[in-house]
Amino acid sequence: MCTNAHPNGSYLSRQEVFLILFALATALAGTLPDVQVGDIVFQESTSSQSAQIQAATNSRYSHVAIVVSVAGHPVVLEAVQPVKLTPLSEWVDRGVDDHIAVRRPAVPLTDAQRGAIATMGLPWLGRNYDARFRWDDDRLYCSELVYKLYEQATGIEVGSKRAVAEFHVDSPNMLAALEKRGIALDQLVVSPADILNDSDLIEVAPQ
């Protein structure tokens, strides 16, 4: 049972309790960047394939998602298993060191474009994750979801598709991993790093 007692034995007033809780809530909120619908968020995933993606793309970031809004609260639409909505705070906590990067188009999105982003991806909820990185809609991987949703909702291409062979995949271990998963070297994919480094996106965080 909580006593709300000061160290000297006196009790906290309701106002003091409110101020403490308010300060705590403000501090926690301050750990998250100020995001908008349509912002693209990146993290270093703790998944089993993260190290391979980092090595292949020469990037810290191995997972990417897109910010939407539910009841006024920021959530991310992400392709994991399955495609789902995740509260932004939970998504941040799930990455390495709670670190994320945020990018948004240099030319601000219109309200119509943001609205389309917030709604057009919802039919993909529950779709299975694509561990083979194919470019069909039956299954989706993270950067494929972001690329396709942006293109369909806004007409903007974020990142670019390129052949798997163009990545750093020439080591025996990497080639064996690709063969095991049925990923061909001439297969076209888009990576989190390709989206992160798109020159038409600006850095929101970290700064």
Image (tube, rainbow, N blue to C red):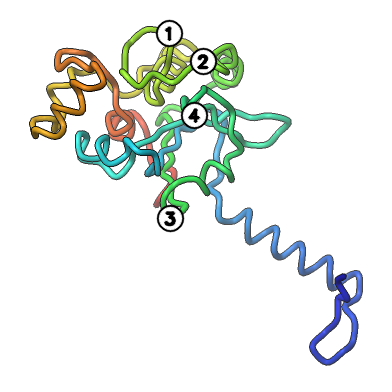
Gap between marks 4 and 3 measured at Cα = 20 Å
Gap between marks 1 and 4 measured at Cα = 17 Å
Q: Amino acid at mark 3?
A: Asp
Q: Amino acid at mark 1?
A: Asp
Mark 4: few/some/many CA within 10 Å (<14, 14-19, 20+): many
The residue that label 3 is drawn on is 97
Mark 2 residue element: loop
Tag 1 near tag 2, CB within 8 Å: yes
Residue 110 placement, left or right of 57: right
Closer mark to the observer between disc 4 and disc 3:
3
Mark 4 residue element: strand
Mark 3 residue element: helix
Closer mark to the observer between disc 1 and disc 2:
2
The residue that label 4 is drawn on is 66
Residue furthest out toward the bottom: 8
Closer mark to the observer between disc 4 and disc 2:
2
Q: Quadrant of residue 110?
A: top right
The residue that label 2 is drawn on is 127
For marks 1 and 2 on the same chain, the one whose residue lies earlier in the sequence: 2
For marks 4 and 3 on the same chain, the one whose residue lies earlier in the sequence: 4
The residue that label 1 is drawn on is 137
